[in-house]
Image: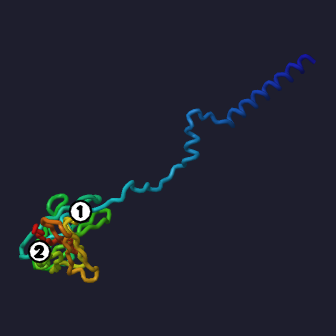
Amino acid sequence: MHFIRRYFGLGILFLALAFIMTGCEGEKNDSTGSEAYFDNNPYSSDERPDALPITLDITPSIAMLDIVGGEVVFTASGGVGVYHWSVSNDDNGQVSSSGANQCIYLCKKVGNNDVIVTDDGGHFASAHITPVTDAMSVTPATVTLKGTERYVAFTVTGGTAPYTWTSGNASLGVISYSASTSYTAGYTAVSGAYGENTISVRDAEGRVATASVEQPEP
């Protein structure tokens, strides 16, 4: 009888040990929290988006050439990888690479053209070549208001519409124009304001022409 009780007690002891070991295997000891992090943030092979969009720029954005054989140097910046240069009109001009980020445009025929740069990532930028005959001018170039005169009309020639007119000093006078007839603009001097003002007009391709207004004291 003593022998049976002894082995019965050992059996209970082994069963208790097996239960404890099974419980230990079922529990995770994650003192660092690493397993919980990876459970909540599974691995993904998707590419992460760029923090900022990649841009490609070219300078100057516009250049004027009025002679066959004339040259302009263009510089690219930004983008990805190697720059590749081309033109929109091979009859009017051609480009050749010059260093890592520049090209030289050679005028073969006076006329409009576009210099185009692309990079290995497919980004694109362009600059415009225009003949000097497209340059702008404002009439009258200089005007002096005398006595009680307060108004003068300006007209722009050349360039590409639409145009934007501005007064350099609004305390001397203001300029107004209609979007549909922006080749002309009217300047109205401020009564009792004296000095020299500059009138500027900018076209759609960034060209700028100016005129001056003298407002002398009586």
Quadrant the N terminus occupies: top right
Q: What amino acid does circle 2 point to? A: Gly
Judged left or right of residue 121, residue 116 is: left
Q: Position of residue 206 (x, y in %)?
A: 21, 70
Residue labelled with disc 1? 83
Task: Determine whether the residue tagged by mark 2 lies in a helix, strand or loop.
Answer: loop
Residue lying at 83% horizontally and 26% vertically, measured from the top left:
12
Residue 78: which quarter of the image? bottom left
Task: Determine whether the residue tagged by mark 1 lies in a helix, strand or loop.
Answer: loop
Residue 37: which quarter of the image? top right
Residue lying at 22% horizontally and 73% vertically, measured from the top left:
175
Q: What amino acid does circle 1 point to? A: Tyr
Quadrant the C terminus occupies: bottom left
Q: Is residue 102 above or below residue 2?
A: below
Please tell me which residue lies in front, 200 or 54.
200
Looking at the image, the residue that sits furthest to the bottom is 181
How many residues crowd around disc 2 within 10 Å: few (fewer than 14), some, or many (20 or more)? few
Residue lying at 18% horizontally and 58% vertically, measured from the top left:
100
Q: CA distance from mark 2 to mark 1?
A: 60 Å
- Front: mark 2 or 1: 2
Residue labelled with disc 2? 147
Please tell me which residue lies in front, 183 or 80.
183
